[in-house]
């Protein structure tokens, strides 16, 4: 088949404007490739969408089968052997025609390589699930990872939500973080939240706070819910600019006041960017004044609506200064400071050398202790990997997906030996575990030394 279709499995079969290069960047034939993203067929043509750039790329049939076999379990040599047999072609021809496709996707960060096959791990039910109830939102925040705005057409219905809550309860999921979009924009939000609370599941609402009125605050208090409210500056104009809606700061602050008055424990969350880094201490003081229980900073990751907005990313050295400042506040009488990225580096160096601990799992607790369910019902380690070929709760039970999802189990398989560069030699790796894999994904190499770490990038 390969001989009968000249050019098959070459980069020439992709659209000209995809920017693919062929630099032979992938490892040797014993390495294990994984292409985790959706491939669909439209008008007789196989296509895949780059989640980082949103570019659509066309595949011919042979390229489709090549990528489907890059499943995180087969080695490259095994894939070449299978293709050679299936397409009745010699191995060297298959290799020559596969290289441009594999090389180009690797260069774009869409094909991941490990030296070991993935495993399937039996892990307990997640302690928490972040559940995007809707993609609809009344704001257009610059950093929004899900590009929230309009409601998607295939959003989970109320009946779908109740059935999923029953599954969560039966599986003994401890906490639901109801998010979005803006979760409270759903007309049936309180029906969903109250049904979950009736199943003895702890509820936290991740909200922009603009829709909180006295009645809403009292309802949340009655179900013993918690709230995480986003506030990006103590200066209204900066917050409104970041959230792209005039007057949103005032509504958010009023919402926080009503939640605190009703007795709802509030976490004040600030996404740290170049727009507000110098204002974070003042946001902390404002949170103290408002009576919030916890203060949390979140690193900006250029994904979703923030894709490519690298000018909003704070340099690691400056983030280190902020982290050191907030650590000093842990002994004060203000809000509790939530755990922060790389704060472990302020403690004594671990005694165990990384060379003796290469089997340590890397990455955050996504796919281990928690996961995300999107508004459409897809199950992901976190929102940053939306677009991956994953299972949906409309088609399979949540418990089945948690146990059997290839994508979740791939993340459970990642080890310290997969890391490259400075992280592979760092004594902190067994503690920080490489931190946010998604941040590296936006830099097109999930196993590179972490782009946010001040030990990797000291300036």
Image (cartoon, grey):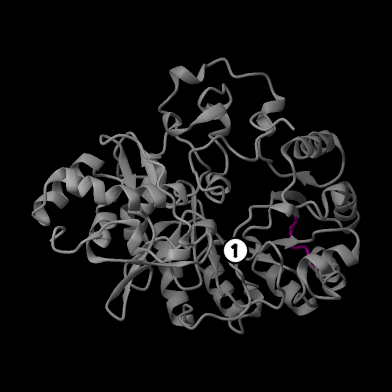
The segment highlighted magenta reads: 261-270
Front residue (pair 237, 76): 76
Say if 153 sits above or below 16 in the image. Answer: below
Residue drawn at 73 percent across, 68 percent down:
208
Residue 178: give x, y in percent of width and height.
Answer: 59, 66
Q: Quadrant of the C terminus?
A: top right
Front residue (pair 3, 253): 3
Q: Quadrant of the N terminus?
A: bottom left
Residue drawn at 87 percent across, 71 percent down:
250
Image-quadrant location for residue 271: bottom right
Image-quadrant location for residue 328: top right
Say if 36 sits above or below 321 in the image. Answer: below
Q: In the figure, is residue 292 to the left or right of 428?
A: right
Residue drawn at 56 percent across, 34 percent down:
449
Front residue (pair 70, 129): 70
- The residue at which mark 1 appears reads as 304
Residue 396: give x, y in percent of width and height.
Answer: 32, 67
């Amino acid at each position: 088949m390969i001989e009968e279709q000249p050019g098959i499995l070459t980069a020439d079969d992709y659209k000209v404007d995809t920017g693919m290069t062929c630099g032979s960047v992938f490892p040797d034939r014993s390495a294990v490739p994984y292409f985790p993203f959706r491939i669909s067929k439209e008008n007789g043509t196989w296509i895949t969408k780059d989640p980082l750039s949103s570019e659509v790329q066309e595949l011919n049939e042979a390229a489709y089968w090549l990528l489907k076999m890059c499943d995180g379990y087969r080695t490259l040599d095994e894939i070449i052997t299978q293709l050679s047999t299936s397409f009745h072609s010699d191995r060297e021809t298959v290799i020559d025609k596969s290289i441009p496709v594999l090389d180009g996707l690797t260069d774009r960060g869409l094909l991941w390589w490990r030296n070991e096959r993935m495993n399937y791990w039996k892990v307990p039910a997640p302690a928490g699930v972040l559940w995007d109830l809707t993609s609809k939102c009344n704001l257009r925040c610059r950093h929004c990872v899900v590009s929230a705005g309009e409601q998607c057409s295939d959003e989970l219905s109320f009946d779908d939500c109740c059935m999923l809550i029953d599954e969560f309860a039966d599986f003994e999921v401890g906490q639901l973080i109801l998010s979005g979009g803006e979760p409270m924009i759903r007309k049936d939000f309180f029906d969903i939240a109250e049904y979950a609370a009736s199943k003895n599941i702890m509820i936290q609402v991740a909200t922009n706070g603009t829709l909180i009125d006295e009645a809403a605050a009292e309802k949340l208090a009655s179900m013993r819910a918690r709230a995480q409210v986003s506030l990006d500056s103590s200066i209204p104009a900066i917050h409104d600019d970041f959230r792209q809606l005039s007057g949103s700061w005032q509504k958010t602050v009023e919402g926080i006041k009503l939640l605190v008055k009703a007795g709802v424990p509030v976490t004040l969350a600030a996404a740290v960017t170049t727009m507000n880094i110098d204002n974070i201490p003042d946001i902390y003081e404002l949170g103290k004044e408002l009576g919030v229980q916890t203060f949390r900073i979140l690193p900006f990751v250029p994904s979703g609506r923030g894709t490519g907005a690298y000018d909003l990313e704070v340099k690691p050295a400056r983030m280190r200064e902020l982290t050191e400042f907030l650590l000093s506040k842990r002994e004060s009488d203000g809000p509790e400071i939530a755990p922060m990225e790389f704060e472990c580096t302020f403690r004594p160096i671990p005694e165990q050398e990384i060379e003796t601990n290469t089997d340590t799992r890397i990455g955050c607790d996504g796919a281990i202790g928690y996961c995300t369910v999107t508004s459409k019902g897809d199950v992901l380690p976190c929102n940053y990997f939306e677009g991956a070929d994953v299972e949906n709760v409309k088609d399979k039970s949540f418990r089945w997906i948690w146990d059997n999802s290839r994508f979740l189990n791939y993340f459970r398989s990642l080890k310290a030996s997969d890391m490259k560069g400075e992280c592979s030699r760092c004594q902190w790796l067994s503690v920080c575990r490489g931190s946010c894999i998604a941040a590296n994904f936006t830099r097109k190499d999930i196993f590179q030394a972490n782009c946010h770490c001040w030990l990797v990038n000291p300036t």
